[in-house]
Amino acid sequence: MLHSEDPHYHRAAEHLRERLEGTTIDWVVVSGSGFVGMAGDGPDGLGMTVEGSLPLRGLGLPVPTVAGHGTALVFGTVGRQRVCVQTGRIHPYEGHPINVVTAPLWAMLANGARGVCLTCAVGGLDPALRTGQVVLLKDQMNLFGPTPLVGPRFIDMSQLYSPHLRARLQAIDPGLGASSLAEVVYAHARGPQYETPAETAALRALGGQVVGMSTTYEAILAAAHGAAVCGVGVVTNAASQVGLSHDEVQERTRAAKPQVARLLRGLLAQPPGA
C-alpha cells in the first residue's frame, strides 16, 4: 500500500476504520452518475446485506453536489465478501483538489480493499457503440487530467484494468452477448462542460472510444495500492450530441442499472483474486 502524509487521506481512513469496528473490506464499488442506490437489494442492487454506513462528511470530506450521486459509504456483505460502496463521487470540477476527491477511495483501500470496481456514465466516441450499451473499460487516457500520485510514483499502467476481472465479468452472464460487453478505451475530459465536436474528434483520433469526467484518477490510485481494478460503463449518449443534458444521462444510466447490477453481483460474490 502507498504511504502518504496527506491529512485528508489519514483522517478519512481512520474515521472509516473506527466505523468498521475491526473488520476489513474485500471489494470497493464506486457509483457513477445515476448509479445511486446500488447498495440496495432490489433488481438494480448488488444483493448486499447492509451492515452500516458513514456519510462522506463523517470522513471530514465535502459531499457531491451533482444530481444522481449519493453522499455516503455503505458497507456490508455480498455472499461471503465484504463490500463497501461509495454511493457518489466528488469531482474535481466541483472545485475540490484531487486528494479530497480520492480520499474516500484511499480510506477503503487503507482498510483492506483488494478489488475495485468503478462504474460510470460515458459518452460514445466510437460510432459502433449504441446508447444504453454496457461496456467494460480495458484502458484509459488521462493525458490532460489530474493524477492522485505525488513524488516518484512510477507505477506500471500496462494492465491498469485487470484482464482477469474483465474475463470474469465477460463470463458471468453469456446471455448478455459479446456486443453488450465491448471492451473500450476511456478518455478523460475534465468537464463539467460536455465535449465540443473538435474535442470529440481529437479524442477519437487519439484512440478513445468513450469519454467521461471521472474514473481515471481512481483507477490510478487503486492500481498504485496494488488493487485489482475493473471499470463498467453505460454509454448514455454520443459525444458532442446536440442538446445533451445531465437528466438524460441519468435516465439512461438508470435504465441499464439492472444489467450492471447483475454483472457486479456475480463479480463481488468471489474474492478479487479468485
Image (cartoon, rainbow, N blue to C red):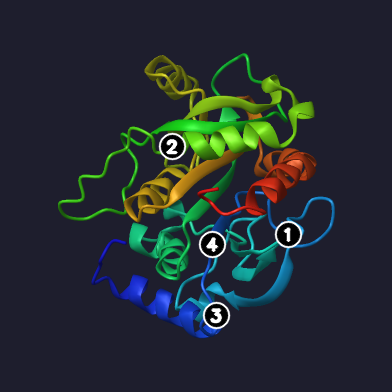
Q: Secondary structure at mark 2?
A: loop
Q: CA distance from mark 3 to mark 2?
A: 35 Å
Q: Secondary structure at mark 3?
A: helix
Q: Nearer the viewer, residue 2 or 238?
A: 2
Q: Nearer the viewer, residue 258 or 158?
A: 158
Q: Which residue is drawn at the image coordinates 63% and 69% (left, top)?
A: 74
Provide residue 30's location: percent of width, then percent of height. Answer: 56, 55
Residue 189 image label: 2
Q: Amino acid at mark 2?
A: Ala
Q: Which residue is drawn at the image coordinates 44% and 19% (left, top)?
A: 198
Residue 82 visible here: yes
Residue 20 image label: 3
Q: Earlier in the sequence, mark 1 or mark 2?
A: 1
Q: Amino acid at mark 3?
A: Leu
Q: CA distance from mark 1 to mark 3?
A: 21 Å
Provide residue 38's location: percent of width, then percent of height. Answer: 72, 56
Dot 1 alpha-carbon crowd within 10 angstroms: few under 14, some 14 to 19, many 20 or more:
many
Q: Earlier in the sequence, mark 3 or mark 4?
A: 3
Q: CA distance from mark 3 to mark 4?
A: 13 Å
Q: Amino acid at mark 1?
A: Gly
Q: Secondary structure at mark 1?
A: loop
Residue 37 image label: 1
Look at discs 3 and 4 and give the one toward the viewer: 4
Q: CA distance from mark 1 to mark 2?
A: 26 Å
Provide residue 148's location: percent of width, then percent of height. Answer: 31, 54
> Where is mark 4, residue-wise?
26
Q: Are marks 1 and 3 in contact (CB under 8 Å)?
A: no
Residue 235 visible here: no
Dot 3 alpha-carbon crowd within 10 angstroms: few under 14, some 14 to 19, many 20 or more:
some
Residue 262 image label: none
Q: Earlier in the sequence, mark 3 or mark 2?
A: 3
Dot 2 alpha-carbon crowd within 10 angstroms: few under 14, some 14 to 19, many 20 or more:
many
